[in-house]
Image: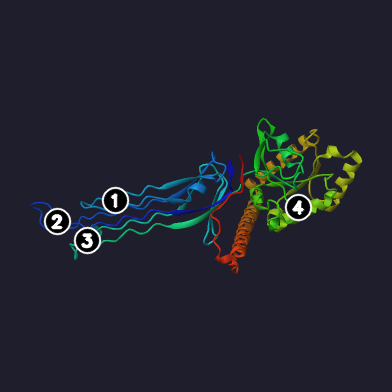
Amino acid sequence: MQFIDEASIRVEAGNGGKGCLSFRREKFVPRGGPDGGDGGDGGDVVLVADPALNTLVDFRFQPLYRAQHGESGAGRNKTGGHGEDRRVRVPVGTSVIDDETQELLGDLVEAGAELIVAQGGRRGRGNARFKTSTNRAPRKTTPGYPGEARVLRLQLKLLADVGLLGLPNAGKSMLISKVSAARPKVADYPFTTLVPSLGVVRVGEEASFVMADVPGLISGAAEGAGLGVQFLRHLARTRILLHLVEPKPLDGADPLDNARLIEQELVSYSSALARRPIWMVISKCDLVDDAERTALLERFAEVWPDRPLHAVSALTGAGLTELTGQLMEAIRENHRALEEDPDFAEAQAALETEIGADVLESSLARRRRRAAAAAEAEAAETGDEPESPDEVDDSDIEVVYVRD
């Protein structure tokens, strides 16, 4: 299966049908007058959020979407048929960006939500429309107007309440597999997680939230090292970030230094996303004794005194019930504040707008780096000077990972 979370497509709305030039001609009806009908409106291109989809892979094979043109008008004041709309299914959580202006056209975050991305052209008018008391036989018509055409960049951002953050092998996949029905790959080596995954965490019979796991970050991820930061866009819609830190890294590094490294990469990717609530979680606490765990918690509390701090073990289950219970309560409080506090809701909307701008800029920077690297590789083969990144065409599709 291919997991593709960014794609470029072209959409073309239908043109409006032209108006008809016609005059009524019947036996025994002299000078019957104009009877040319109007054309039909062109069809729109509409994106529809479909919960059955979870990847943009379909757009790799079908990058062009056209709506139907409106039909021309006819005599006897017959109006041309309207062009049929082209309805295109996309996954829930898709952001739609005009690739030329970089304008965010909309976010499809609810199942069934629709967004018109290309407006059909207006109909042309037939000559019957131009009849007046002084112009009984007009020969004037208007053509149909052209429909809109755009190149769109679609970006999929998973919808989740809680997002997991941390270095590779920090225990993120193990954690989500223990608290939900998600079954990501778990192994004792880094980068076992290559694609994002979602899991529903049930705290009670009628209480649950969605958790997202993304591939781990390493130093220099913002510049493309490792798997880069491209998957961080899937944490953009989360309300809480869980930063998992391994207490005894295999390379002997200081856990606090590792935590600072991830924080730096997060800020480099999006300073706005770094302003989301972040909870610190010491994972794999079964690897250390009580004294080591207490000392480590004290060190983290000294650096981030305002953040919730937890120690858990996905292997033994220690601390998981307390962690998920407190997360559920925090998410409920967040929903309550969004509904009851207009100032809080406004601040959250502004923050989400900032995060969206950072995500888009990161995507554009990644495309420029790829274009520059491709130009340098081509120049090395031909011996010519490399083109500037602005002169290099970007790839129409980003294949993030191919899984058998």
Residue 354 rendering spot, x and y as whole percentages? 64, 57
Q: Is residue 271 visible?
A: no
Q: Residue flagged by tag 2: what amino acid is it?
A: Gly
Residue found at x 60% / y 58%:
367
The extreme left residue here reads: 28
Quick one: SS at disc 3? Answer: loop
Would you identify the image quadrant in which residue 329 lies?
top right
Front of the two marks 4 and 3 = 4
Q: Residue flagged by tag 4: what amino acid is it?
A: Ile
The extreme front residue here reads: 382
Mark 4 vs 3, N-terminal side? 3
* Up/down of 306 relative to 377, above or below: above
Residue of label 2: 32
Residue of label 3: 131
Mark 4 vs 2, N-terminal side? 2
Asked if disc 3 and disc 2 are in contact, CB closer than 8 Å, the reply is no
The extreme bottom residue here reads: 385
Residue found at x 67% / y 30%:
205
Residue found at x 44% / y 50%:
65
- The answer for how far apart the CA atoms under marks 3 and 2 are is 12 Å
* Up/down of 382 relative to 251, above or below: below
Residue of label 1: 80
* Up/down of 65 relative to 207, above or below: below
Quick one: SS at disc 1? Answer: loop
Residue 156 rendering spot, x and y as whole percentages? 58, 48
Left or right of residue 364: residue 219: right
Quick one: SS at disc 4? Answer: helix
Residue 39 rendering spot, x and y as whole percentages? 30, 54
Mark 4 vs 1, N-terminal side? 1
Quick one: SS at disc 2? Answer: loop
Residue of label 4: 262
